[in-house]
Amino acid sequence: MSIHYNMDPISSLELFYDGEHHGVYRGDFIKNEKKRGLVLPPMLHEFLERFGYLSVNAGGLHAYRIFHPDDMAMIALSDGNGGEIRIIVIGSLRVIRQGTENEEEAFLVGVRPDTPDFQMAMGQEGENGGMDWWPTGRTLFGFLNMMFLSILGKSCSSYIFEEPSDIKAVLKHHKFDISQAQFTGDWATVHFNDESGEFIITEFDEDSGSIKCVRVAALGSGGEEAAENLTALSLDELDEIFGAEFYGNALHCDFERCLAIQAEIITRLEAAGTDEKEMLLHYKLKGRCLAELKRTDEADAQYAKMMEIAERHGSEDPKELADAYTTLGNYYFDIGRVEESDKLFDKELVLRRESAPDDCYHIGMIFADRAKRLEGDDSNLDRIIELCELALEEFGKDPRDSGCKYEIARMQQIRGNARRRKKELDKLK
């Protein structure tokens, strides 16, 4: 067995989230550094950039939340000796006030950037309306470690060993070198057995420095946010990460990664008995990923599920059915099944004219998309010109619409190119 000892919280979260990132845009750090002089400790910067929008930083009752850099503040307090103590207010904590059932109280979290180990502080509004601050005795490393351990406990099943004999036995089972887990001031240290896929947390008695408890937590072992191969990501997080890659990185999309995420989403939704109309989009997106990866047999199956659902509910939601015709028509065209593609576009045209005759943009796009796909094909110049004219007729019904206005210019360009090319070819005859 190979054990990684005394892991830093960033490395622990990398394992926990299986390499998935969803955090603050790098430019936001640069902006705050230039405009406000806000320079964050490197570990805090890295945490926010990689994991700022994931569950570890979701906050909520009895959970810390670190702010976006735009919402942080720099303050200076008197040290009582004529000097000052600088604090960056980086986050907050909400808890139920002791002795009450549901009365909340709020605290601010700060870090001292002028200390070598980045000491942490807590603040709360005082009786006089000002803020009272006090040291926590914890470093930034220990604070982020605590946030990691909190989300680990919520998301993965843990086994707790507190008896000395049990602690000794479990560490022996993992071939754990106890000399590697020395108390350095933090209440717990994190280790990972990469063979068994388990985190080993050693908790210390802060007076004696001896190990008083060992927790073992297996990745993907349960909890409402656990997910095989996409450990601890909630459905909302999976959707956000998928969108960031699929839409936000469209020009260089990693379709393998998107496929894995979408497959996980579908598995969970199907297991939960989600209404089939809500599944339609997910089948469509999975089909697109499979199509981009040239796995056409599997893409066919996903698109078949999409069409089956869309057609079953076509009378109550004709727009969804029309959109499904568009998706499948484009897919068939891309893989060379042009006749089937044309039949689907014809079905879409009939449906849209029946259900939304005034929707000139979407009706026009049926012709425009076909013209765009044929652009550059010298054997279809007449057809391209015809499609452009049909599209222009529809878009011309509402030229002030921003979408129609853009497409009018595009169709005029494509039609003009096709006409010029046709003249060039006629001269060569």
Image (tube, rainbow, N blue to C red):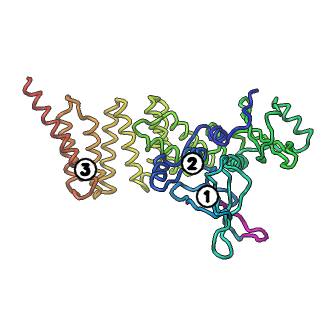
Instruction: Specify the label residue 369 is tagged with.
Output: none
Viewer-nearest of discs 3 and 2: 2
Q: Amino acid at mark 3?
A: Tyr
**Total number of numbered discs in the rendering:** 3
Q: Is residue 335 left or right of residue 58?
A: left
Residue denoted by label 3 = 406
Residue denoted by label 2 = 48
Where is residue 115 drawn, in percent x and y?
65, 50
Q: Is residue 221 left or right of residue 263?
A: right
Q: Residue at x 71, y 31 (%)?
A: 194
Q: Residue at x 52, y 35 (%)?
A: 257
Magenta residues, start to end: 90-102
Residue denoted by label 1 = 87
Q: Quadrant of residue 339?
A: top left
How packed is label 2: few (under 14 Cα within 10 Å), some, or many (20 or more)?
A: many
Is 220 colored magenta in this rendering? no
Q: Earlier in the sequence, mark 1 or mark 2?
A: 2
Using the rendered image of the protein, determine whether residue 269 is visible from the camera's viewpoint. Answer: no
| Label 1: element kind | strand
Whether residues under marks 1 and 3 lie with C-beta atoms below 8 angstroms apart, the answer is: no
Whether residues under marks 3 and 2 lie with C-beta atoms below 8 angstroms apart, the answer is: no
Is 101 colored magenta in this rendering? yes
Q: Residue at x 59, y 37 (%)?
A: 19
Where is residue 291 drawn, in percent x and y?
44, 33
Where is residue 63 drawn, in percent x and y?
68, 57
